[in-house]
């Protein structure tokens, strides 16, 4: 019989991501206020990175709260966040200029194909030395890799906005918060869906890139393409901000529904495997 977890530990574990989010928001607000008052440019990288990483890290911690169902260790999840982010942005920076000259509705799907491939590179690197036939492990590791990519990409967007606006702090904060709020609907969700299928279809020690994995890759790349492309396609009908929010929230909602189904299946498979002693 599995030991019953003490109630105070359950509360503490469930509340961890809330603590990180609230404390991080307070620190970010303090940092922005100090930066606004002092205009000390040395603070800009720290404040921008705090704002860009806050929600991605919170999202990963939310999944880490369920580590009792998974074999993944904290270090492995942290590596997924790091390598998925760093290798992902490096690969995307090299490949996108070769295949995408300007953003249109159709080239947005090329970006989706490139970035969804790039984010998985870090996962494949880490998983080489780990048993990877658990859909739940893949979902958590994929969420970490996707959010690592999202955090670094948002940092880049915030820095670019700051430069192009002539040093506008308000625009930088707006870009950082908007991308942070939308990030759980995007990169982390898409990569979690893809990697969960990769792990489910694989065997210990080797990946199997069969038709289901390819189908999952095309699905998330398609969602990614719609996320980037719908605002352009809708530009004649609505105001720019409404375009972005409407299109991305709808596409993001579809991704979250798919992820929820993947999570439900992953938990059932994990509990079945534990019941049979596998």
Image: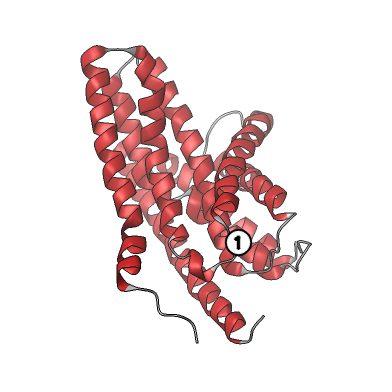
Q: Residue at x 30, y 38 (%)?
A: 241
Determine which quarter of the picture holds residue 166.
top left
Q: Position of residue 104 (x, y in %)?
A: 52, 37
- Seen in the picture, residue 10 relative to 163 is either above or below; the reply is below
Identify the coloring.
secondary structure
Q: Give me the residue at 36% from left, 34% from top.
A: 51
| Residue 235 visible (yes or no) | no
Q: What is the tally of numbered marks visible in this picture?
A: 1
Residue 161, percent from left and from top: 39, 23
Work out whether 170 lies above or below 223.
above
Residue 244 picture quarter = top left
Spot the residue most to the right.
206
| Above-or-below relation of 132 to 274 | above
From this viewpoint, is residue 194 visible?
yes
Mark 1, Cα crowd under 10 Å, few <14 / some 14-19 / many 20+, is many
In the picture, residue 5 is in which quadrant? bottom left
Camera-side residue of 161 and 99: 161
Task: Decide which of 155, 174 is in the foreground and name it.
Answer: 155
Q: At numbered mark 1, what does the secondary structure look like: helix, strand or loop? A: helix
Mark 1 = which residue?
A: 138
Give whichever of 156, 251 is nearer the camera: 156
Residue 104's place in the image compared with 186, above or below, is above
Q: Position of residue 182 (x, y in %)?
A: 37, 46
Question: What residue is rendered at 67% in x and 80% in y?
Answer: 278
Please tell me which residue lies in front, 266 or 76. 76
Q: Residue at x 53, y 59 (%)?
A: 140
């Amino acid at each position: 019989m599995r030991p019953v977890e003490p109630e105070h530990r359950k509360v503490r574990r469930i509340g961890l991501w809330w603590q990180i989010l609230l404390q991080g928001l307070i620190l970010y607000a303090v940092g922005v206020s100090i930066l606004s008052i002092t205009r000390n440019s040395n603070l800009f990288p720290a404040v921008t990175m705090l704002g860009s990483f806050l929600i991605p890290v919170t999202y990963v911690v939310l999944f880490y709260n369920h580590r009792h169902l998974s074999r993944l260790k904290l270090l492995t999840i942290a590596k997924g966040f790091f390598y998925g982010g760093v290798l992902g942005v490096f690969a995307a920076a090299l490949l996108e200029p070769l295949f995408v000259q300007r953003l249109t509705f159709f080239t947005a799907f090329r970006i989706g194909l490139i970035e969804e491939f790039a984010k998985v590179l870090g996962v494949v690197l880490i998983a080489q030395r780990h048993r990877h036939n658990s859909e739940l492990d893949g979902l958590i590791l994929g969420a970490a890799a996707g959010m690592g990519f999202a955090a670094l990409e948002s940092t880049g967007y915030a820095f670019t906005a700051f430069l192009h606006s002539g040093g506008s702090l308000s625009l930088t904060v707006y870009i950082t918060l908007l991308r942070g709020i939308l990030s759980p609907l995007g990169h982390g969700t898409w990569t979690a869906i893809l990697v969960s299928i990769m792990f489910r279809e694989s065997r210990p020690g080797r990946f199997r890139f069969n038709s289901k994995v390819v189908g999952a890759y095309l699905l998330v790349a398609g969602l990614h393409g719609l996320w980037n492309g719908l605002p352009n396609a809708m530009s004649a009908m609505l105001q720019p901000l409404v375009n972005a929010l409407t299109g991305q929230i709808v596409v993001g909602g579809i991704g979250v529904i798919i992820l929820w189904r993947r999570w439900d299946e992953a938990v059932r498979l994990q509990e079945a495997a534990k019941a049979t002693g596998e």
